[in-house]
Image (cartoon, grey):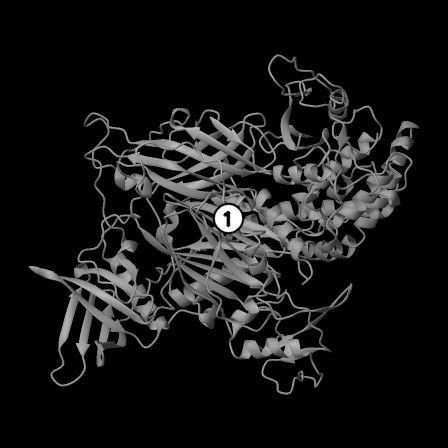
Amino acid sequence: MAAAGWYHCDISQEVAEELLAKAGRDGSFLVRDSELVKGAYALCLLFQRHVYTYRILPDDEGLLSVQTIQGIQAKCFHTLPDLIGAYQHPNNGLVTPLLHPVRRPRPAEDSGEPGRGRGLCPAGSGEGPAELLTLPAVGEDARGWGHTMPCPGAPHSSRTHIPQQLHQRLQEQVHSSPSSDFMGFMAEYLAHHVQDLEALCQGHPQLRHLSTALATACRALHSEINFMLAGLETLARVFEAPVSPHSPAREQVSSFLSGDPDLELLLNKISTVNHLLSSLEKKVLKSLQETVTRHNLALPSVAVAPLPAARPLAVQNFEVKVGKSQRAAVTVDVESGTVTITRRGSGSQEEVIPQDKILQLIKYQSVQSKVRLVCARENQKSLSRDFIFPSARKREAFCQLLQLMKIQHSNLDEPEIISVYVGTWNMGSTPPPRSLASWLTSRGLGRTQDETTACIPHDIYVIGTQENSLGDREWVEFLCASLKTLMAIDYRVVALQCLWSIKIVVLVKPEHQRRISHVHTSSVKTGIANTLGNKGAVGVSFLFNGTSFGFVNCHLASGSEKTHRRNQNYGDILHSLALGDKRLGCFDLTLRFTHLFWFGDLNYRLDMDVQVGPCRCQAGDNGGRGAWGVTVSSLAQDILTHIVKKEFQALLAVDQLNLEREKNKVFLRFSEGDISFPPTYRYEWGTRDTYMWQKSKPTGMRINVPSWCDRILWKSHPETHVVCNSYGCTDDIVTSDHSPVFATFEVGVTSQFVPKEAPGSSPEALACIEWESIEVMLKTTSRSKCYIEFHSYCLEEMQRSGENTFQNCDIPGFLKLGWSSKHLPVLNPILPDLEYLGDQHLLLSIKGVESCESFGECCLALRSAIGTTAQQFETFLFHRGEETGSVRGWMRVRVPRGRCGTRERLYEWISFEEEDAEPAAEPPMCPKPPPQSRPRSLPEPATGFTNPAYFIFEGVP
């Protein structure tokens, strides 16, 4: 059967619209996989410059039918090609017949390696009816692979469907198995297995071709098996008579491959190893028990030493300026909960401030080393003290200690703020050094921890590595031992997820272990043809009490010229990583978590064309000469000069990741700390003074400009608390050509809310979320009617709006939709308390009525909408990592009287102020953005847009 060129596997709706727009003719069509229903498809059809999407659904018997307009009887088909052929005729319920199939584009040329472009399905995804790997037809030599593609839904009676089906099964297994190196042998056999099939039909059941393929693939096993077998038999002889080479275990071998003596011998060996391993433990245990009984021995009880308690924090002293010139010493005693101020000079005065009298801590933005302490005094107004520290880092250490003091003396049952450490390191396939102290304590270059706070243990450690050659258990034990040495705490392992040499480990303090739930792990391969795990990502997600966390460690495609391929890797990971609540599977991965951290060897380089001679260039060399006396280009010397002078902004301006983020290609609305550390790649092993500019690859010599390949980014729900306290790299770990990178975060968390009034103690008053209007602008050529889905943990179930009441597409390529209050549901949260609702969020998904697929999703915070008057909201829409439009509207959250009590959170007592601002007399109890005035009646939706090319509403930057 001819290749189904109109079938595009798992492309997004936006990509489908782009392909149809390029086709430009009415009746152009393509088929892609449904984003919602596995085994279903979406038929995308272009008519009068608009794209219409129809769902193709299978019934219980596997028959396919198109959902069209009412009144048209649905027709059922056995295969997808039959369905497409039938709808090439008019009057079948579509806006126009299927006239011009839109073919799959070729893979992107700049990827530089086999794989898929934006319009191709991932090999081994296992989700679509066909794979990227193409198969030879009967009689076609395997060398002809790549010229045909299996057509989805082809009849099972076709002989070519047998190898196609087997190849698809092979791809699905390879995608979820580390044994991808075995794929070549098996793929070769599947290409020729028809010969075994024909031999079988003629009465020859030996399967000679399979025997030959297996014998070739397993040739290297013989020496390994011989080595293992000799050792096991030696150990077995210690406890029992030697195992005979002709033991029954060796004789129980299947004879279906008896035609190959080498393979039969190998199977004998494997069977013997299996027999020995399964019986050895029982034999050893029985022998030891008999020894104890025979000699009347008593096993001594082993006293287990108690775990060492966490080290108490030492009292810390800071030298500061008070006022214009007076010097003072500020002492912070976290354990006793006091701050002591001792002024220098004659008649030194000492002032002791208990932690419960500290009302507010104000950081000045204009003077990075200045802070104001606001304290309460009995029967008097609040008193403020201004301190100027020697550096901004000392100020941050002081603030962290005061924050920790507040936490320890808060008497709260559950934490409201935790510290999270994130580290990433490409280990270069070499063992780590004995000590990782500088990495795990955030010391080195960049924005680092002060020595007074470096050894304060974090609540959560998330450590991602790439090219990690250590075994999984060995690596975890090494990390736990390192942290125990540094912090005197036995951290607990929450999760370990590995993909070849890409690993992520999550460790928590023992007291937090019970607070962790709903742990999920996942991995995605993005290596060659998306089947090899040398590149890809691993992820972990969990709930910390009521706050959801996601962590992704990735290793993207290498090479300065492969920016587009790295963008593709990011999109593949974003779409395929199965993390978080399954009920939120239709939402963009970046919206499923309260806090999402994404890090790893992203491999984005400096976008510079540099030519240098062999082989290395040393920062600080004079005269433009490399370490071997080879003249380097002036551009390369400029780069080194910027690095030596710490003039990083000039280099970051051409950083590929920053450039791609500015183009909205990757990491939309993510945050990253300020980079004030030198490029972390590519150093010469054993030093941090010399960058290696050239690297030998099978394809030739590659130039490696010093680059910030190793990065840590994050994205959080709106109006949540997350502060990056450090972001830097080490300068003393030199076993790899990458420097380890670290970042630490202060993160606000929520716990299970317990209302003050027990349910049923009084007439139940309900809170409600009301909408006055919602307007949506979509970047699409579709004319579909839409509805909105509302998801939230504060709702008992998902809620849905009616169809949009307003619609226009006057601006080409954009669709504007509007909903009035009558067509929007009133949402009733499960709890009506203000303190509870202030921590909740709503997820909105804009879906097409015909396709039920999402055009975009967003997240809204309820905190700023609590009150009696409606508040305006404006935000962006995302889908599969791309910005697809924007949404705005008016909403209010009504809270019943008697349920409006709230309190200050531990992270709200620290604020930022400009130099001339006066401190607040009392700390704000529930900080909210200023209210916006608006007319009581909403005007009709506007039809004009000031910036249609950006498909965003007026006034949104």
Q: Position of residue 636 (x, y in %)?
A: 65, 76
Report whether residue 377 is seen: no
Determine whether 560 is above or below 290 in the image.
below
Q: Is residue 87 above or below residue 193?
A: above
Residue at disc 1, secondary structure: strand
Q: Position of residue 185 (x, y in %)?
A: 80, 47
Q: Residue at x 68, y 38 (%)?
A: 21
Q: Position of residue 403 (x, y in %)?
A: 29, 61
State whether residue 573 appears in this view: yes
Of the pair 439 and 384, the residue shown nearer to us:
384
Residue at which label 1 appears: 540
Quarter occupied by residue 421: bottom left
Name the residue furthest left. 379
Task: Give me the residue at 65% from left, 37% from top.
Answer: 17
Image quarter hosting the N terminus: top right
Q: Is residue 161 left or right of residue 623?
A: right
Q: Position of residue 759 (x, y in %)?
A: 24, 29
Q: Hey, what amino acid is under mark 1? A: Val
